[in-house]
Image: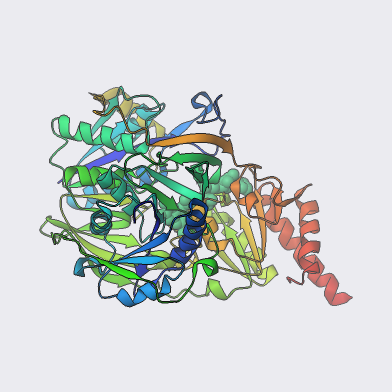
Amino acid sequence: MHILVLLKMAPDVVEDLEIAPGGKALDLDCLRMILSESDDHALEQALLLKERHGAKITALALDAPEVDDALFTAAAKGADRVMKVVGMDPGFTTREAARYFSQAIAEEPGLLPADLILTGVQAIDDLDGLVAPIVADGLRMPYLGIVTGVALEASAQAARAIKEYPAGVRGEFLVQLPAVLGIQAAEKPPRYVPVAKVRAAMKSVKIECSQALTLADGGLPLVGVVEMKRNEPAGHAEMLEGKPDQVSGQLCGILAERGLF
Amino acid sequence: MTGNICVLAEQWRGQITEVTYETLALGREVADQAGVPLTAILPGSHCRELARFLGAADAVVYIDHPLLAETVPQTCAEAVAQAMAGERPRALLVPLTNISLGIGTLIGVRLGAPVVNFCRDIRVADGRLLADCVMYGGKIEATVEAGAPSGPGPAILGIWPGARQAEKGRAEREVPVTDAAVVLEDTGAIRLCRYIEPEAGDVDLTKQEVLVAVGRGLQDRANLPLAEELARALGGAVCGSRPVIDQGWLPLSRQVGKSGLTVKPKLYVALGISGAPEHIEGMKDAALIVAVNSDPQAPIFSVAHYGIVGDAVETMPALTAAVEARKAAGQHA
Ligand SMILES: Cc1cc2nc3c(=O)[nH]c(=O)nc-3n(C[C@H](O)[C@H](O)[C@H](O)COP(=O)(O)OP(=O)(O)OC[C@H]3O[C@@H](n4cnc5c(N)ncnc54)[C@H](O)[C@@H]3O)c2cc1C
């Protein structure tokens, strides 16, 4: 079994996000990039499948700041092969990201055949589409998203995938392989890997590079950001200020006044 | 459909979803601004009678096929793309729900049309279609132009739940229904085997008047008792955001949000929750929302009535003590 995991870096929203001059994009110089949260879960789901059934895992990422760390971490966790696509046009969109992934999958030896292609269901910057369905459509593979669990059938020709619906309802799907799954959450939280193991991977593992090809139509300038601004939450909520016991006292008074306890 | 504003009507388990009504309400406004009709597109199997619930639209296009009984994204996208082929609607609004996620992207790819996700609002200005989008977990707002009127295909706009009130898009009446014939291939590649109903939890969150909600800012499972004590003092129950449930700190029956429950308590205390749109859609209608977050820019403060910038772990015991003291004082008075 070969599992291909597609990884995309996304801005860490714990940091303050700044808007670039021009007001149409984030200021890349002020960003800290981290692995998109659901991609981390996709990697974890692949590792769980490898533990259960034995599999070769290839992690394929798009070049971005901190991507090497993410790939070495993937290797330290158990990915067998790590590769990054380099040379994309700056400021590529999610739809373009999906096409860069698809090109690399088609061009690089050994990425296909893949029995399962796992990636995160949605990243916080997926403004013009989602990666998983586009890659699936391009490869003519079935796609299922918002997946929170995958079990292989005995034949290894199919998988049972759990998809989330609203209100805590889930659906169990039988998916013929090869398939692309958009992972929402792995069956277990992404594992922790000690820094020493990541450092060891940095010494022993080679990140392969795949050169991005120019997109045939020069990309898809179909969606144009007119203006971008920070959501300034101030102004809506009445802010209570002071030490914890002071604000608690104030809040308590407000709740009591409203008869809430 | 040419020039029209269209809405993808979701049906799930025999009913039109609430988010469809919300999206219809928004679609109605956009269609009126553009001075064009509003069309609802309803894919399904043997559910033509549901069209009468889509009375907020001027017309319904019904796509009937056995493979559309369950919403499988690729099949549904293919059906809608076929139904729209040869027509040039101005826009197709697709609810961003767990049922339809991915369908908008696939329709956009098949039609070579622009896709804009994360839309909270849509408006027509000087003939341009502008979408106000909430992205980066709610921290950034972007105004996005979705393709030119003469550009390729309709603009496919993914609409966040809660964009409008469902009531405004709910209208039951006879609407002209057109049947669209589509040819779909049964590859059998994806099949729904069964629904798994949520296990009944020890408490029904939807019936609680007070909820103390914890998020990743709780930092550690060991801090959960602090939230439980606060909930006990306030006479409520503890619930959580997705990461808290994914970590196994609380059961799925306590998850609030898109994949969890929608709650409307009298009081919702959000502790260490950032306020991502997927969480907010489950709690925004609480009568009083109090948020405690160490980040003054946390989007949760946009929906909260009262906010405290601070450490949730320090605030919880202080608030519990204050509530207990006040209750004791009340008893002695
Ligand atoms: C299809 C789909 C379905 C989803 N369904 C749901 C759902 O049902 N429910 C849901 O909640 N999410 C859902 N999500 C996930 C959602 O996008 C967010 O990732 C999630 O809500 C974030 O949870 P959080 O706020 O606890 O964590 P984070 O976003 O990581 O926020 C943690 C917050 O804690 C604050 N903090 C840190 N330390 C402290 C401290 N000591 N004191 C106070 N504050 C602190 C930080 O400033 C931050 O704001 C879904 C996502 C998708 C794509």
Q: Nearer the viewer, residue A25 or B164?
A: B164
- Dividing the picture into quadrants, the one containing residue A110 is top left
Residue B207 against residue B259 in the figure, above or below: below
**Total marks in image:** 0
Which of these two is toward me, A102 or B178? Answer: B178
Picture residue at 35% right of the left edge, 34% below the top = A73
In the image, taking residue B10 as reference, residue B180 lies left or right, namely left
Q: Look at the image and tell me whether residue A76 can be seen.
A: no
Judging depth in this view, the residue of A99 and A4 nearest the camera is A99
Colouring convention used in this rendered image of the protein: rainbow
Task: Pick out the residue farthest to the right.
Answer: B333
Examine the rendered structure and indicate whether residue A178 appears above or below residue B46.
Answer: above
In the figure, is residue B46 to the left or right of B275?
left
The x, y position of residue B29, in whole percent, is 52, 57
Q: In the drawing, does residue B80 fall left or right of residue B128? A: left
Query: Which residue is depicted at the point 25% across and 46% down?
Result: B110
The x and y percentages for residue A30 are: 54, 26
Residue at the far front in the pictured view: B35
Nearer to me, A166 or B146: B146
Query: Can you give x and y, in whole percent of width and height, for residue A120 in the image?
Result: 34, 46
Q: Where residue A173 sits: x, y (%)?
A: 24, 63
Left of B40 or right of it: where is B299? right
Image height of A71 relative to B164, above or below: above
Residue at the image position 74 percent from the left and 72 percent from the top: A261
Judge whether residue A49 can be spotted in this image: yes
Q: Quadrant of the C terminus of chain B?
A: bottom right
Instruction: Classify the position of the N terminus of chain B by image quarter.
Output: bottom left
